[in-house]
């Protein structure tokens, strides 16, 4: 066999092209690694804490001061300002110095004890969704505690004991157990899907680019000659170096997420590694499918970028796919990241038997199988060697 032809020759040639290309070095190596460092650093605290708020206490009694101290003791809340008026607190929110305002009206304690049902008023800035939602939880909790505290004082003044009062104030005791992510750690929630999503985007773009660049530089026919006219040899030789690189990056992601940061991995290393590997193959298969359908380098690259970006929304990790329109829910199955996410939930978070994830594993491998049907289209594209603008 001629050493200048065959899978190994194409394999070596592709390694050389990657090593000499600044775009490949920055896109394939630097972008995922920088994303890993930046995202892990940004979410290193796990859950936002000590979020600044303003309190307007117009009553200023022992009861309201106690409530304010309790609110300030919450981990997520930091009473940054005790404003003299609501207008002052509102201006602080408009200047984004605080993310919520709690207003305690005048005569709050007296009205509560006399049964006039005063109102605790609070505003949260939900333009910042996470901060606003977390503060809403704390403010809702403190309003419940305020109601209970006033009820306790009123009942004690009437001569009831605490044991008699508590079953009335809190007839049902809630024992909550968050599953999968009991720490409510946003890094566990987000980075386990965002980082593979970034990897999928990189794979889609560089799979299309690896073949499109051959046509752009008019080396498509030479590549086919190196593969002895076999598109299968060309595919294996071209894509294998990238598969090795992406698998190494996936192993780095797993090391940082599951071994260094100790994120949940209930079913161990192998199911999640196979999940990452299937995602890599599926994204490469999808890149081949796009190039085979459109047979235009620039259009395929644009569509691949679009699919990579839409994946973050349609996957269902931030907004449930089941709550989407039925057509969008069905469409989500055409995105590899959707199946990766479902496997991650079952294997890493819930720890259920691997057999329950076989459908998702098969769905990822289907992208590879479908790609075989477009090998002929790409062979024609390389043989024509015409770059379409």
Image (spheres, grey):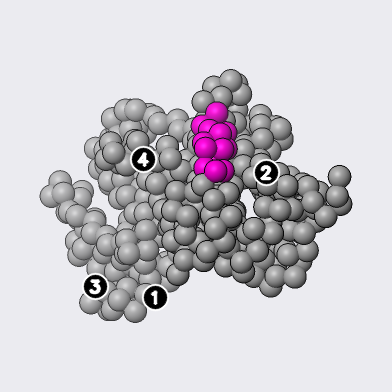
Q: Measure the C-alpha gap from mark 1 to mark 3.
A: 14 Å
Work out whether residue 93 or residue 312 is closer to the camera in this orientation and state it: 312
Q: Are marks 4 and 2 in contact (CB under 8 Å)?
A: no
Asked if residue 360 lies in the magenta stretch, the reply is no
Magenta stretch, residue numbers: 362-376
Q: Measure the C-alpha gap from mark 1 to mark 4.
A: 42 Å
Give the structural element (helix, strand or loop) at label 4. Answer: helix
> In the rendering, at what x and y percent does residue 75 appear?
50, 55
On the rendered image, what quadrant is the N terminus found in? top right
Q: Is residue 224 above or below residue 180?
A: below
Horizontal side of 64 relative to 282 (left or right) equals left
> Looking at the image, is mark 1 or mark 4 nearer the viewer?
4
Q: Name the residue under label 3.
A: 86
> Looking at the image, is mark 1 or mark 2 nearer the viewer?
2
Question: Residue at horizontal 39%, vertical 75%?
Answer: 97
Q: Measure the C-alpha gap from mark 4 to mark 2.
A: 34 Å
Q: In this view, does 83 lie above or below 72?
A: below
Prevailing secondary structure of the magenta residues? helix
The tag earlier along the polypeptide, 1 or 2, is: 1
Question: Residue at horizontal 51%, vertical 26%?
Answer: 359
The tag earlier along the polypeptide, 1 or 3, is: 3
Q: Mark 1 points at which residue?
A: 97
Q: In this view, does 43 lie above or below 229?
A: below
> In the rendering, at what x and y percent does residue 133 appear?
37, 54
Q: In this view, does 79 lie above or below 66?
A: below
Q: Mark 2 points at which residue?
A: 230
Work out whether residue 374 or residue 189 is closer to the camera in this orientation and state it: 374
Q: Name the residue under label 4.
A: 331
Q: In which quarter of the image is residue 16?
A: bottom right
């Amino acid at each position: 066999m001629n050493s200048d032809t065959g899978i190994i020759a194409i394999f070596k040639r592709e390694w050389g092209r990657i090593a000499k290309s600044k775009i490949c070095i920055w896109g394939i190596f630097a972008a995922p690694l920088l994303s890993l460092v930046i995202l892990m650093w940004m979410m290193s605290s796990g859950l936002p804490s000590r979020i600044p708020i303003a309190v307007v206490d117009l009553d200023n009694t022992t009861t309201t001061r106690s409530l304010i101290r309790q609110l300030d003791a919450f981990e997520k809340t930091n009473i940054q300002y005790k404003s003299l008026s609501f207008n002052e607190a509102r201006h602080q929110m408009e200047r984004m110095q605080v993310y919520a305002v709690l207003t305690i009206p005048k005569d709050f304690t007296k009205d509560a004890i006399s049964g006039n049902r005063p109102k605790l008023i609070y505003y949260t800035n939900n333009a910042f969704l996470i901060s606003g939602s977390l503060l809403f939880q704390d403010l809702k909790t403190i309003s419940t505690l305020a109601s209970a505290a006033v009820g306790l004082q009123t009942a004690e003044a009437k001569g009831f004991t605490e044991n008699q009062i508590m079953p009335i104030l809190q007839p049902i005791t809630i024992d909550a157990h968050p599953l999968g992510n009991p720490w409510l750690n946003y890094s566990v929630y987000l980075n386990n899907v965002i980082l593979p999503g970034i990897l999928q985007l990189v794979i889609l773009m560089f799979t299309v680019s690896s073949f499109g660049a051959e046509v752009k530089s008019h080396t498509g026919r030479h590549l086919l000659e190196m593969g002895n006219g076999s598109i299968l040899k060309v595919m294996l030789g071209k894509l294998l170096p990238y598969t090795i690189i992406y698998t190494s990056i996936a192993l780095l992601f797993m090391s940082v997420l599951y071994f260094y940061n100790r994120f949940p991995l209930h079913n161990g290393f192998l199911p999640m590694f196979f999940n990452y590997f299937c995602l890599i193959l599926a994204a490469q298969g999808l890149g081949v499918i796009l190039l085979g359908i459109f047979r235009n380098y620039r259009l395929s690259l644009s569509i691949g970028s679009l699919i990579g970006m839409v994946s973050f929304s349609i996957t269902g990790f931030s907004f449930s796919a089941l709550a989407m329109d039925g057509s969008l829910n069905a469409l989500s199955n055409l995105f590899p990241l959707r199946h990766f996410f479902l496997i991650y939930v079952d294997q890493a978070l819930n720890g259920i038997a691997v057999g329950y994830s076989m459908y998702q594993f098969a769905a990822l491998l289907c992208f590879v199988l479908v790609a075989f049907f477009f090998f002929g289209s790409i062979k024609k594209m390389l043989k024509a060697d015409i770059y379409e603008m």
